[in-house]
């Protein structure tokens, strides 16, 4: 019977770490035309590491010390990379006050009586003058698939930090599998276009970069006009996008937000599990027909 086939499909998923919230979700997953992926923590491992520190208006040590202070109040993956690097370098991090996130653009905080900013290169360029040789260095870092951020204060650039988050080991193969199943794939990222392109071309999928949270929602609605859309995110800052898609898939089951908003959760955190989910849905529905 139909309910029995659905129930057994859901239990087969559960045994493989694919949690599916009900029959409607299981049925919908196999029919999606597009799978949109968040980058950080979804296609990448979400364990970004600082790879470069450049001193501009301050020494490298000073850049790391001040940046770690600004990021102390942020839970962004980039913030964790910077505070970890400061701890590794045994830098004494000063206290910070009034930390403020600037969604999709950066963060600011007051440190030692100064208001400091850490911004994306494009946000920095829109608020202060970035010299041509520094712009060239930022471009080179981004073409290497790194995320560069600019530490600045009172219109002066103090330094640059570059962070790299490695793609998950099975991501490239999983994208190819989805394509073989007739599913379009796209990466949606707030990161800059050069970094986005470097990562996406390595994985073999399309990319839309420099997106603010509201841009991701708009793109998902547009894609929904062409057919079913699944959105895969790590569930922390992706909850609105997961809810907007026809099928929201949380990478990992660690956060309550993920489990509340998503239609499915991938407990093993493998990109290939997205393809497995589509296959499981199609197999289940074939058994019913
Ligand atoms: P993604 O979609 O890739 O997860 P976000 O929208 O979270 O990216 O962030 C977009 C960009 O904003 C980052 O690449 C970075 O340049 C900047 N940014 C956001 N938050 C921070 C932060 N805490 N520290 C430094 N840069 C940040
Ligand atoms: Mg993100």
Image (cartoon, grey):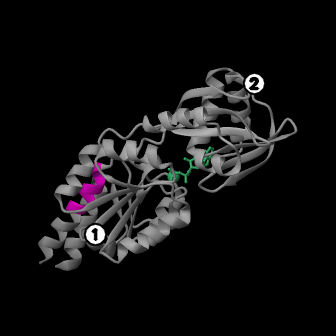
Residue 208, numbered label: none
Near-viewer residue (221 or 144)? 144
The answer to whether one can see residue 41 in this image is no
Label 2, label 1: how far apart the Cα atoms are: 50 Å
Q: Quadrant of the C terminus?
A: bottom left
* Residue 39 within the segment the image draws in magenta: no
Instruction: Identify the residue shown where x is 20% and y is 61%.
Output: 279
Q: Position of residue 266 (x, y in %)?
A: 37, 54
Magenta-tinted stretch? 272-279
Q: Quadrant of the N terminus?
A: bottom left
The correct choice, above or below, for 269 with respect to 7 in the image is: above
Residue 92, numbered label: 2
Q: Position of residue 207 (x, y in %)?
A: 38, 54
Q: Position of residue 128 (x, y in %)?
A: 71, 46
Q: Ligand 1 near label 1 (Cβ, under 8 Å)?
A: no
Asked which quadrant contains residue 116, the reply is top right
Near-viewer residue (128 or 64)? 128
Label 1 crowd (10 A; few <14 / some 14-19 / many >=20): some
Instruction: Identify the residue shown where x is 60% and y is 46%.
Output: 120
Count all numbered tags in the image, as a single digit.
2
């Amino acid at each position: 019977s139909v309910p029995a086939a659905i129930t057994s499909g859901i239990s087969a998923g559960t045994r493989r770490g694919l949690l599916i919230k009900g029959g409607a979700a299981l049925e919908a997953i196999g029919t999606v035309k597009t799978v949109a992926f968040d980058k950080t923590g979804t296609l990448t491992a979400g364990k970004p590491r600082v790879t470069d520190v450049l001193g501009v208006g301050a020494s490298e040590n000073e850049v790391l010390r001040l940046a770690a202070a600004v990021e102390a109040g942020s839970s962004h993956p980039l913030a964790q990379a910077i505070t970890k690097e400061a701890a590794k370098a045994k830098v004494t991090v000063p206290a910070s006050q009034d930390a403020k996130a600037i969604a999709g653009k950066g963060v600011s905080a007051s440190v030692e009586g100064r208001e400091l900013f850490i911004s994306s290169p494009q946000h920095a360029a829109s608020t202060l003058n970035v010299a041509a040789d520094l712009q060239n260095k930022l471009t080179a870092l981004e073409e290497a698939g790194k995320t560069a951020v600019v530490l600045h204060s009172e219109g002066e650039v103090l330094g640059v930090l570059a962070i790299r988050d490695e793609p998950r080991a099975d991501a490239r193969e999983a994208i190819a599998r989805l394509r073989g199943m007739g599913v379009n794939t796209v990466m949606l990222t707030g990161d800059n276009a050069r970094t986005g392109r470097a990562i996406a071309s390595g994985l073999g999928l399309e990319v839309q970069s420099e997106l603010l949270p509201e841009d991701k929602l708009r793109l998902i609605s547009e894609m929904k006009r062409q057919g079913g859309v699944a959105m895969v995110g790590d569930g922390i800052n992706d909850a609105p996008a997961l809810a907007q898609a026809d099928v929201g898939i949380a990478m990992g089951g660690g956060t309550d937000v993920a489990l509340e908003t998503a239609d499915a959760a991938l407990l093993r955190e493998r990109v290939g599990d997205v393809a497995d989910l589509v296959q499981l849905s199609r197999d289940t529905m074939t058994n019913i027909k």
